[in-house]
Amino acid sequence: MVLQRPTNTELEQIQQRKFNVFISPFIILITLVIIAVIYYANHRMNEQKISEVKISDAYITEISTLKVIIENFSLNKSKKDINLQSLADTLLQIPYIHRVFPSINHDGQLIVEVEEKHIIARLISESSHKYYISDDGAILPYKQISFKHHIPTIYGLNSEKDKNRIEEALKLIKLISEYRDASLLPYIAIINFREKDNIEFIINNNSRIILGKLDNIMDKIDKLFAYIQLKNQNRKYFSKVLDLRWRDIIVES
């Protein structure tokens, strides 16, 4: 029998099989090492204790109050033992907080970003109880706050009985806040709802502005803004009473 010399292609296939037999265990070993390193790193990261708590700025809710709640919930606990959703739910029970964004970074810092509710008015009820109203219509407990923005005070509404009228007040304040880039809002000191079918403003110089009902409210606000601009340009005193209930005129007295 005559032995035939392997062709070049057969030689290449033989060499490839030998190479695969050699390299396959090596690849498997490298893969196992990588998996072990990743597992160890993740395990170590999960077992890492929370070393520090960072809280974003909050000017209504005391930072110290937030810090105590968060530290009691998380400090010296492993990352894997901290339920961020549960922490957020706990903080959302504080009435002034709107949203919470907790996260943990690679250095073991728990970072909590707090978004507070936007207060747009102060409410003093007929029984002289004080509250705040946020832009989502929530009635919030009163406390001394140094606001970064102007808020008017509402009189003549009860937080429990007058929910429909509070909705009216909310729409009116939002309208004023958005009017001409909020250029009218700083003038409005008081919004009076004491009379059922008559809403009144008290502006900063104690002028009484009679609006009546909310019918044609944009026309009334336009007239008030034009009146304020005219008086400011001419440096004249405001009338004590302005009646805006009539469509084409302003009645001064």
Image: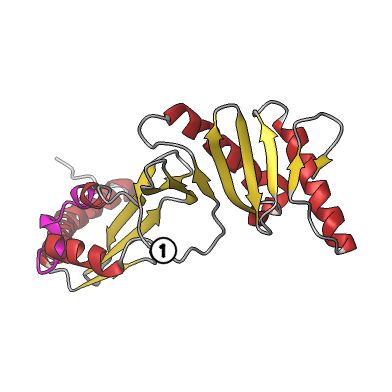
Residue 206, percent from left and from top = 66, 55
Q: How is the image coloured?
A: secondary structure
Local crowd at mark 1 within 10 Å, few (<14), some, or many (≥20)?
few
Residue at the extreme front: 253
Task: Tell which of 202 and 232 is nearer to you.
Answer: 202
**Toward which corner of the image does residue 146 lie, by quadrant?**
bottom left
Q: Amino acid at mark 1?
A: Ile
Residue at point 58% right, 44% down? 191
Q: Which residues are magenta?
A: 74-87
**What residue is pinned by disc 1?**
145
Q: Is residue 14 left or right of residue 141?
A: left
Residue 78 lies within the magenta run: yes
**Toward which corner of the image does residue 103 lie, by quadrant?**
bottom left
* Image quadrant where one finds the C terminus: top right
Residue 187 lies within the magenta run: no
Residue at point 70% right, 52% down? 207
**Toward which corner of the image does residue 196 lie, by quadrant?**
top right
Please determine whether, in this image, residue 247 is positioned above or below residue 125.
above
Q: Is residue 161 visible?
A: yes
Q: Is residue 25 visible?
A: no
Residue 114, percent from left and from top = 36, 58
Residue at point 29% right, 52% down? 12
